[in-house]
Image (cartoon, rainbow, N blue to C red):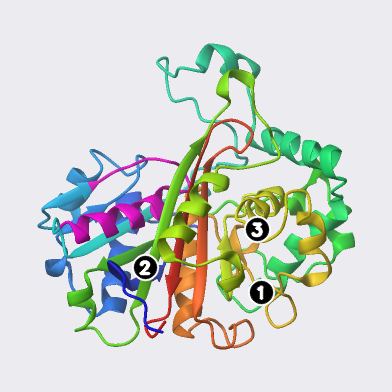
Amino acid sequence: MSRSCKAYIAGVFEHPTRKAVDKTIAQLHAEVAIGALKDAGLTKDDVDGYFCDGATPGLGGMSMAEYMGLDITYTDSTETGGSSYLVHVGHAMTAIAAGKCKVALITLAGRPRSEGVKSLAAKDYGDDLPERGFEIPYAPVITNMYGMAAKRHMHEFGTTSEQLAWIKVAASHHAQYNENAVLRDVVTVDDVVNSPMISDPLHRLDCCVISDGGGALVVVSPEIAKTLGDRCVKLLGQGEGIKHLNSGRIDLTYTGAVKSGPVAFAEAGLTPADMDYVSIYDSFTITVLETLEDLGFCAKGEGGKFVADGNLISGTGKLPFNTDGGGLCNNHPGNRGGMTKVIEAVRQLRGEAHAKVQVPDCTLALAHGTGGSIAQRTGAATVIMGRNDA
């Protein structure tokens, strides 16, 4: 059965650097843009829509369009943290369907490692931050926020540190084949639970890497896709949502994926059981576990059992995930990992992932991004994609 769609991903590119000491953020944006356009078989002169997040230098789309020499008729700089790029995919689909643009370029770049960022501390966005007076005085740190979520999930459902560790183990099994990955050593459950405690119950190996770099996507209309060959990937469904503290009435055991997932699956006319592969935002192991539950791959509270015993490892597990090593081992550019989740899902659907981790006959895939903190306010976006012949 061939499924119709509003738009296709024609090009992807992940910057190979993990420490860009000799490059500006604008340079990184330009380099990933060139890479994705080359992958699509297009040039910058074909681009008429540009999408970026709120951390992009200058005045976002305006500044970067000038820097890269783009002649655009549509731009979007929606900011939802690490989920921004999957939000941009959905917005590009809508803009293309409405005739606002035909070739949409989406870029991400950042240099936290070169700039000396050593932890995922909460960012102070200024005096006008609505929650400033309630949170900033207590100096919240992202690891503490995720530690609270993990502790609550353990309290409610009996989840264990060993079960969470299997997520890191799976990522490491995949990262060993990625020559650009920050961490390539395969680890065991014992390695994870015996690594230093960072924020109880999360250990060092439960946390993602910090890296420079970036990535880009090129989203095109069906008409353009027909001229580019069979490497284009269908965009079948997209959903997004926001979860926040709700004046203190918050449940730490779920994420915004409970909102974005059902919308994406409904638009695609598919279910979790249809997916051959998933890319799940993995800032911490608990992020993956809760997201898998919230997207419907297992019941709430059953995530620990679902991920245990290597069930996320390609070739052996029931649901291969993050076959590039993910944020836990490969790359977390700009502390925003949603972009790379889409890129690896596209590689899988094209059959271009590393041979050791390529999912056989990968036809349908899901990518999910998380922004902010799952224990405070968070953005979520889910994209469902299909192989060209899906």
Instruction: Describe the element under mark 1 as helix, strand or loop.
Output: helix
Q: Residue at x 83, y 39 (%)?
A: 156
The boundaries of the magenta stretch are 76-98
Q: Which residue is mark 1?
A: 174
Query: Split into 4 quadrants, where in the image is the C terminus?
Result: bottom left
Q: Mark 1 or mark 3, which has the lower sequence index? A: 1
In the rendered image, residue 19 lying in the magenta stretch gets the answer: no
Q: Residue at x 66, y 42 (%)?
A: 254
Instruction: Describe the element under mark 3 as helix, strand or loop.
Output: helix
Q: Please, is residue 220 above or below residue 67 in the view? A: below
278 sits to left or right of 47: right
CA distance separating discs 2 and 3: 26 Å
Which numbered disc covers residue 235? 2
Q: Please, is residue 64 above or below residue 142 in the view? A: below
Which numbered disc covers residue 370? none
The residue type indicated by label 3 comes to: Leu
Name the spot of residue 96 as percent of width and height, x first.
20, 60
Q: Mark 2 or mark 3, which has the lower sequence index? A: 2
Q: Circle 1: is it few (<14), some (14-19), or many (20+) Cα within 10 Å?
A: many
Which one is nearer the viewer's eye here, 75 or 235?
235
The answer to whether one can see residue 157 in this image is: yes
Q: Mark 1 or mark 2, which has the lower sequence index? A: 1
Q: Residue at x 38, y 85 (%)?
A: 389
Which numbered disc covers residue 328? 3
